[in-house]
Amino acid sequence: MQPESGANATTITEFILLGLVETPALQPVVFVLFLLAYLLTVGGNLSLLAAVVVEPRLHTPMYFFLGNLSALDVGCITVTVPALLVRLLTRRRAVPYPACLTQLFFFHLLVGVDCFLLTAMAYDRFLAICRPLTYSARMSRAAQGLLVAASWACAFSNALTHTVAVSTLRFCGPAEIHHFYCDLPQLFRLSCSSTRLNERLLFGVGFIMAGSPVALIVSSYAHVGAAVLRIRSAEGRRKAFSTCGSHLTVVGLFYGTGMFNYMRLSSAKLSDKDKAVGVVNTVVNPMLNPLIYSLRNPDVQAALWRVVTGKRSPA
């Protein structure tokens, strides 16, 4: 830490990220585990993205959004894990203030786009199952592009708002963050100025950014569930629930960990539970998504096999 003298206190120019474990003997184990998780996540999501691109059967709106989601998962884990691996190798835990805010911005940008894309996928399932006659017209290529562009625009506004708001806070010390990446709850706890406005902003914007998508997802799947139950064929119901079940699993993991992470701002001290939720949110979820979406989907499994083996899709 390199302090600058002020009137009454010093201003922090670096934060110390303590990471997941402080015991030196465990750090090589953490390095290996996170390196493997990173390689598996990047490999799995890029393979799924390649399958969506090269497989004609997957050139549908649902898989278009899934391909975007895979690219986002690679971005989300890349924002946090490589920096952690470098710190474990160099044993330098200091992170410059601008680098911390940059990580904060890109993390919230990518997670925000993820949030809206999951909503777009729920809307896609609603149209496909409840409005099949107008599905092609409503979910055209232009509509898909508009939904993705709107997701990026909203997420950018959210990330920029929180980053600018955090930049107005004063940090006088201590500079130790009991976590492995920079995020709002950790920085709020270190601020020596009032964070009341920032917390209100987090809850207010969070209600719009997370509450509205959750309401739309629940509404979409309530209609989907009612429509599926009206299907007379047991095979038809099974197929419909199968395509929706994967998405609902991902939604549950995404919002469950997110709510735990950001609804505990009043907690005075970070616990191991917070670190565990951070690992699930930034590492486990992106790693599991390709598995969840391909586990019960024979089309995705076949496409992934052709990508791995280099075989062409049958005409």
Image: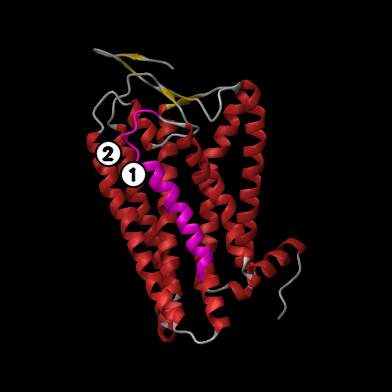
Q: Earlier in the sequence, mark 2 or mark 1?
A: 1
Find residue 300 and report its image quarter: bottom right
Q: Position of residue 140 (x, y in %)?
A: 44, 76
C-alpha gap between disc 2 and disc 1: 15 Å
Using the rendered view, name the quadrant where residue 242 is placed.
bottom right
Q: Quadrant of the C terminus?
A: bottom right
Q: Which residues are magenta?
A: 244-269
Decide which of 83, 234 is in the foreground and name it: 234
The residue sitting at 31% across, 26% down in the picture is 191
Q: How is the image coloured?
A: secondary structure
The residue lying at 34 percent from left, 28 percent from top is 268
Please report the residue visible at 42 percent of the width from the left and 16 percent of the height from the top. 2
**197, above or below 124, in the image:** above
- Quick one: label 1, few (<14), some, or many (20+) residues within 10 Å? some
In the image, 287: left or right of 96? right
Give the secondary structure at mark 2: helix
- Residue 84 colored in magenta in the image: no
Disc 2 versus disc 1: nearer the observer: 2
The residue where tag 1 is placed is 160
In the rendered image, residue 267 lying in the magenta stretch gets the answer: yes
Label 1, secondary structure: give it: helix
Residue found 42% across the figure and 37% down from its top: 102
Relative placement, left or right, of 72 versus 27 is left
Say which residue label 2 marks. Answer: 199
Dot 2 crowding, Cα within 10 Å, few <14, some 14–19, many 20+: some
Residue 224: give x, y in percent of width and height. 42, 75
**Tag 2: amino acid:** Glu
Depicted 204 relative to depicted 193: above or below: below
Indicate the position of residue 157 as horizontal and vertical percent values.
32, 50
Q: Are marks 2 and 1 in contact (CB under 8 Å)?
A: no
Indicate the quadrant where residue 26 lies. Answer: top right
By secondary structure, the bulk of the magenta-drawn segment is best described as helix
